[in-house]
Image (cartoon, rainbow, N blue to C red):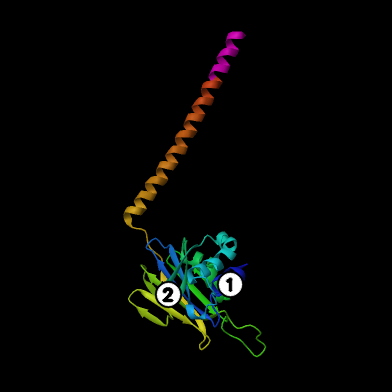
Amino acid sequence: MKKLCFFIICLLLLSGCSAVVNNEVSKDGSVSENVNISENTQNLYTEDESVDSYVQSLIDVYIDTIRPYNYEYSKEINDNIATVKFNKKYNNICSYFNNSLYVNHFMNEVSCNETEDFYEINAKSSYFVCGDDCLEKPELDNVVLSFKFDQKVLSSNADMIEGNTYTWNFNENKENILSLKIEKTKKSFVEEIKEKQNSNVGILFVLGLCVVIILFILILLNKYRKNKIDYS
């Protein structure tokens, strides 16, 4: 299923395409994934139809396969480059690495450990390894994976760091390993107070409900006893 879904945008290629995956990690820990798959329009066999129509027809063929993964998509044709963009949000970075269709397509070993203080991710890709017995070359020539963090990065083996953006380049010319450790966003004092207040309100509500139920039962028992005495 994943192979089929990913194949839709690689149908854009005749010679190979590239993928750029830009992710933004918000203060609350959620991840916004933005995947751009591009190909030079000169490599597309469009016959008499426009490039835009050709790309859309490819998407339409596999749209029912894409939908279950809840990706939003759009297409863009600029400067002889055809690009298909996919977007999705995740609750946290572990959810992203474990569930992203695109990351899991070219990474075969992924682990994400979560503690109270940090997330630690280790991943390895053998996607670009093609030995002597390889019958089918990878659909992608290279993959760029980047993260823009609002959190503190404790350690990483990123190929490039610009400000709070960390980038890894994956291709056949290197050992493709990702190592990343980021600090978990700590809740502010005000947020913690609000959570405690909400928790206390919930506890008080449950206790109050229990008191009402007990009083109701006592009233019924009292009426039952009174009626029993009256009839005796």
Res 15 quadrant in image: bottom right
Q: Is residue 22 above or below residue 199?
A: below
Which one is in front, 55 or 83? 55
Dot 2, crowdedness within 10 Å: few (<14), some or many (≥20)? Answer: many
Residue 12: % across, % down? 53, 75
Residue 136 visible? The answer is: yes
> Residue 173 at what x, y percent from top left?
51, 89
The three-letter code of the residue at mark 1 reads Phe
Residue 225 included in the magenta stretch of the image: yes
**Magenta segment boundaries in residue numbering:** 222-232
Which of the marked residues, 1 or 2, is nearer the chain's N terminus?
1
Q: Nearer the viewer, mark 1 or mark 2?
A: 1
Residue situated in front as seen by the camera: 37 or 76: 76
Question: Which circle marks residue 146 in the picture?
Answer: 2
Q: Quadrant of the C terminus?
A: top right
Marks 1/2: CA distance? 22 Å
Instruction: Judge the density around disc 1: few (<14), some (14-19), many (≥20) Cα neighbours within 10 Å.
Output: some
Q: Residue at x 39, y 50 (%)?
A: 195
Q: Residue at x 59, y 63 (%)?
A: 65
Relative height, residue 174 to residue 154 (above, below): below
The N terminus, quarter of image: bottom right
Amino acid residing under circle 2: Ser
- The residue wearing badge 1 is 7
